[in-house]
Amino acid sequence: MFEDASSEYGVGWKTSTKPATLLKLWAIAFGPGGRVWVGTIPGGLFESRDGGATFALNLPLWNHDSRGGDLFGGVDTNPDGSPKITTWFGTPASEGEFAAGIHSIAVDPRNPDRVLVAVSTAGVIETSDGGNSWRSRNKGMRNENSPDPEAEWGHDTHYIDLCPGAPDHVWQQNHVGIYYSDNGAESWKPVSTFGDAVHFGFAVAADDRDGKTAWVVPGRSDQQRMAVDGALMVARTRDGGQSWQQLRKGLPQHNAFDVVYRHALDQSAGVVAFGSTTGNLYVSSDGGDTWAAVANNLPPIYSVRFG
């Protein structure tokens, strides 16, 4: 969908008006009144208002200025002749494609017209009017892998989760660490440090009542996507990320090569569950203090959810 234009026009990619191919349905979320949201690769957000009987692509997000404007207009350039530039970058999909993807959708339980989505790679984006308009929610985040770490766009958010009982508390596992917001994602605070065991990863789960409590399953690094030091652990915070407790009881502490995908961690009323790429499923009924393996040697587990 995009051609490199960074050498002439700064950091960014020139948009292409070639037809996009739907590569993956990556996330699904539900709202009242039959609303269903589906996030896809390449960066499409589809909405249904009839319980999934019909869907429509959300064009205000698809054609957002941050990705170059109208992608269906048949024109690759702006009125002044410069190329349309997107600040949405790619994530591996399938068949060698590399395209932006929407992997997180969080609907505010107080107001179904307020929705947060997260894009790999662009960042966090919010609508407060049911998808008619969208704005970035990336203040406080740093893109350490970019020539401009303070850029508004281009953040590799791995996953976001908001607390249903306190929706202004939102958690984010980012490629460059863990972020926390207590003001509805208006701004973010880093709550992990490079070099610590609790930093890199893909999944994060917010407690359903206490906005300051969350769980992550750390990995070693981007280059070494496996359990830290060969020992599987879950990290929990109860103070908004000021401190993290490493929870290991019942988890393998030798020769563990598990990594946990972004949708493969969930919690409900203090029961926490996660599945790994090595096909192991673990459950804790005491908030993560102790763990039990309930399945082993399954295929890689991509998603874990409570019914």
Image (cartoon, grey):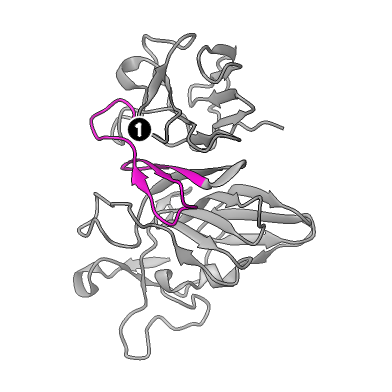
Amino acid beneath label 1: Gln
Image quadrant holding the C terminus, namely top right
For numbered disc 1, what is the local secondary structure?
Answer: loop
- Crowding near the residue tagged with mark 1, few <14, some 14–19, many ≥20 C-alpha atoms within 10 Å: few
Residue found 33% across the figure and 80% down from its top? 83
Residue found 54% across the figure and 25% down from its top? 275
Residue found 56% across the figure and 14% down from its top? 296
Instruction: Say if the magenta span includes residue 182.
Output: yes
Residue 283 picture location, percent across and down: 58, 18
Residue 199 versus residue 12 in the image, above or below: above
Residue matched to label 1 = 242
Image quadrant holding the N terminus, namely bottom left
Image check: 170 left or right of 3? right
Task: Tell me which corner region of the image, top left, top right, bottom left or bottom right, holds residue 10.
Answer: bottom left
218 and 268: which one is in front? 268
Residue found 79% across the figure and 60% down from its top? 50
